[in-house]
Image: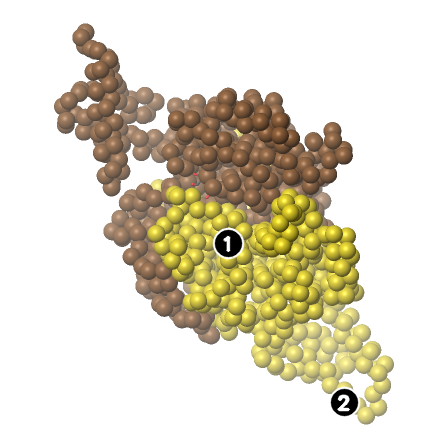
Chain colours: A yellow, B brown
Amino acid sequence: MDAEEFRRRGKEMVDLVADYLENIEDRPVYPDVEPGYLRSLIPTEAPQDPENYEDIIKDVERVIMPGITHWHSPNFFAYFPTASSYPAMLADMLCGAIGCIGFSWAASPACTELETVMLDWLGKMLQLPECFLAGTHGQGGGVIQGTASEATLMSLLAARCKAVRRIQATNSDMSEMEILSKLVAYTSDQAHSSVERAALIGGVKMKKVPTDEHYAVRKDMFMKMVEEDKADGLLPFYFCATLGTTPSCAFDKTEELGPLCNEENMWMHIDAAYAGSAFICPEFRPLLNGVEFADSFNFNPHKWLLINFDCSAMWVKKRADLIGAFKMDPLYLKHENQESGLVTDYRHWQIPLGRRFRSLKMWFVFRMYGLNGLQAYIRKGSNELNQNLLKRITQCREIHLVPCQLSGRFVLRFAICARKIESHHVQKAWQHITQLTFELLQEPEH
Amino acid sequence: MDAEEFRRRGKEMVDLVADYLENIEDRPVYPDVEPGYLRSLIPTEAPQDPENYEDIIKDVERVIMPGITHWHSPNFFAYFPTASSYPAMLADMLCGAIGCIGFSWAASPACTELETVMLDWLGKMLQLPECFLAGTHGQGGGVIQGTASEATLMSLLAARCKAVRRIQATNSDMSEMEILSKLVAYTSDQAHSSVERAALIGGVKMKKVPTDEHYAVRKDMFMKMVEEDKADGLLPFYFCATLGTTPSCAFDKTEELGPLCNEENMWMHIDAAYAGSAFICPEFRPLLNGVEFADSFNFNPHKWLLINFDCSAMWVKKRADLIGAFKMDPLYLKHENQESGLVTDYRHWQIPLGRRFRSLKMWFVFRMYGLNGLQAYIRKGSNELNQNLLKRITQCREIHLVPCQLSGRFVLRFAICARKIESHHVQKAWQHITQLTFELLQEPEH
Ligand SMILES: Cc1ncc(COP(=O)(O)O)c(C=O)c1O
Ligand SMILES: Cc1ncc(COP(=O)(O)O)c(C=O)c1O
């Protein structure tokens, strides 16, 4: 395929993509195929000679589409949202064409530098404390990881390395292996499976802290575990808090837990993979309070911020902690600028060596939406839901209330008005509202 | 941006991509920018309101291009090749539109099944032993990893887990931590830095085996190290062989080393990240001999097989080994088919949870090129080089030889012809040829 044919086929593909996304609702959201369905639909070996492009495209409908779970169908409510937007797709096309492997500054300065600046932009949108930003002289900074799983693993490995060094500095008779065998990490019993997996990979013990009735980790319970483990000769070194748990979107009490971690020299990582995008709205930002105590923080713009997978944003307070965990500089990857202190070589920040130019997607999306547009997108779901809920309440005529607008959000106002009101009236009204909400949420279009 | 605008912008982007790649030679291959150049070219914060798409596209030339190291420029000889082809880019557009996260079979059956079948196709192209293929009942199978680094890490983790279980089965008094502290992995002193990094992440010792004069690991030297370590009470459990080392494309002697690893119950992983694509040509396939002794094998189609980054192909003989290393099944990721034994849930095969529909790129490229086309592509470099070399030899008139074609390769024939020839003539001719080759390779167009 030469450039001329690519121009033609590429334009056809653009239409195919737009057609697919415009008509996605007509397709059954979950495929009706049995395991193994695909193997019998295509040859057992690659063709010897080139095939026609048309035949391949025909096979997309014949072979692929019947087996697709359509994640972007409005009828998809499984797992978690995965982001998608046209500007991000355009940026991905450009990323594919440039096709640089940005493992170091020199391997493509623009790829590295745009990423650093985009993570600063996004950090400011979240009102992250200054210390997490790279700025021009900062010790912190951000990086795009492929997934939250990798961000958690990187934070755990950095914490492990830092703990071993710190403990060895004061206990020179302890071997590294002895320290490793005594290290203990913690996370909530509601944490995502990737957190436990990180500990398994890193070869350290991990304990699950029981949560309260709101599925949140609280200080008292956590402190008790840490004290007991210390009394048993273990070495607590890491805590992964969750802001927005996968099962129920619960929030650990990081404002209580953070100071404890800091006192105990435990690395605090915050996993907000799923809910984190909401923190760009001032009204949700309080949920992020306590991040100032964290050593690292991560959320997935590829879940809820319109940036196609993969794009998981991670910040650290001290990038030296992350880099120090396993910096390696074989000669073939060295470049003359790397010791200047000014450059970032992202290969030290992540598990893989290679990396794509993913910050292009951020740049396109942030600019095409603007912060206002992104906030409106986050708020959209709740605004629509609230409007529909109000409609139901009004139709039922059991109670009466009116809405208001607060910083762009559609809010249901519940005012205590009547002279003769008793608390049982309020309770009954609340029951009615939650019942209607429950019914509304059961319906497929929500 | 709505679908209509995307149709327009997408087609413009297709032209931009084709223009970029057609005229890439006119751009300086290595950028002339200082570290930090980009920050001053763009605002310090994301815009509040949406910007014009035109302004963003103008900024690609103004902000991004000056800082790009053009990996696909014909003047780029640094690091290693990274693959790029139009069919792969088209497939990537489709992958972005479908935007499924294929961590389990149910999360998108087509995504999982096409990957399994494509890895079988590719395995057959490489003439991998049957036991590495998934087939319909196989115990082995392939997976697309993001990078070779991740493949190596996965193999080391699987080996670590298997070794701990095996040793505990016969030494029930040894704790897991004690075993971990005695495990020792090996690799060549020429291995890629990602191999050492895998051991650091996994928290196990790794020793470097000195190589012979061709930079290859040999059995005698390796066996000596293993014996000494065993005598010291260590537990050898893993060897990562390299086929095509990064500095000099050397090949470890896997035919000698494999049986040793098998006898010693050591997992043998083969890292052929860079050179592996060549094994699809029968004339290079002998370099892969010994793979039948390996537990896992990996190479990067994203380096030299026309499939854009990221696409690293990995096969294992027993997928249970890989999956068993850290299978976790939280309820929210379970699906009804998963215990049927017929389905593959690729999340157990890799570090990240999420994964894109990368096998589409393989499918498009394999079909658009056919095996013949892929082989011709691999052979192209050497054919051209050999033709140019012959031209030089002919121009110099010191020696005379003629070419031939062997299975599509342009071969320089060196026939011993004259009655009065002595071995010093042959030596002189060889010196002459290597000198001309050396000069040719120094020139920028090669
Ligand atoms: C709280 C939380 N953490 C981590 C993850 C894993 O995300 P990723 O696929 O990016 O590894 C999820 C995914 O649902 C999540 O909800
Ligand atoms: C032999 C070898 N192994 C591993 C790698 C790392 O590859 P990746 O970037 O896919 O992790 C390379 C890259 O050059 C290599 O040459």
* Residue shown at 51% from the left, 74% from the top: A372
Q: Position of residue A294 (x, y in %)?
A: 61, 64
Which one is in front in this view, the residue at disc 1 or the one at disc 2? 1
Marks 1 and 2 share the same chain: yes
Asked if one can make out residue A289 in the rendered structure from this viewpoint, the answer is yes
Disc 1 residue type (three-letter): Ile
Asked which secondary structure carries label 1, the reply is helix
Question: Could you give the CA–CA distance between mark 1 and mark 2, rounded to whole angstroms?
Answer: 60 Å
Q: Position of residue B139 (x, y in %)?
A: 63, 30
Quadrant of the displayed image that contains ligand 2: top left
Pick the quarter of the image with the C terminus of chain B: top left
Q: In this view, does A294 lie above or below A176?
A: below
Q: Mark 1 lies on which chain?
A: A
Dot 1 corresponds to which residue? A323
Q: Badge 1, how many Cα within 10 Å: few under 14, some, many 20+?
A: some
In this image, A313 relative to A185: left or right? left
Dot 2 corresponds to which residue? A417
In this image, A210 relative to B95: left or right? right
Disc 2 residue type (three-letter): Cys
In this image, A1 relative to A349: left or right? left
Give whichever of B276, A265 is nearer the camera.
A265
Location of residue B199 by image quarter: top right
Asked which secondary structure carries label 2, the reply is loop
* Residue shown at 50% from the left, 47% from the top: A352
* Residue shown at 41% from the left, 59% from the top: A341
Q: Is residue B75 above or below residue A24?
A: above
Q: In the displayed image of the protein, which residue is found farthest to the bottom? A: A419
Location of residue A399 by image quarter: bottom right
Asked if one can make out residue B251 in the rendered structure from this viewpoint, the answer is no
Q: Badge 2, how many Cα within 10 Å: few under 14, some, many 20+?
A: few
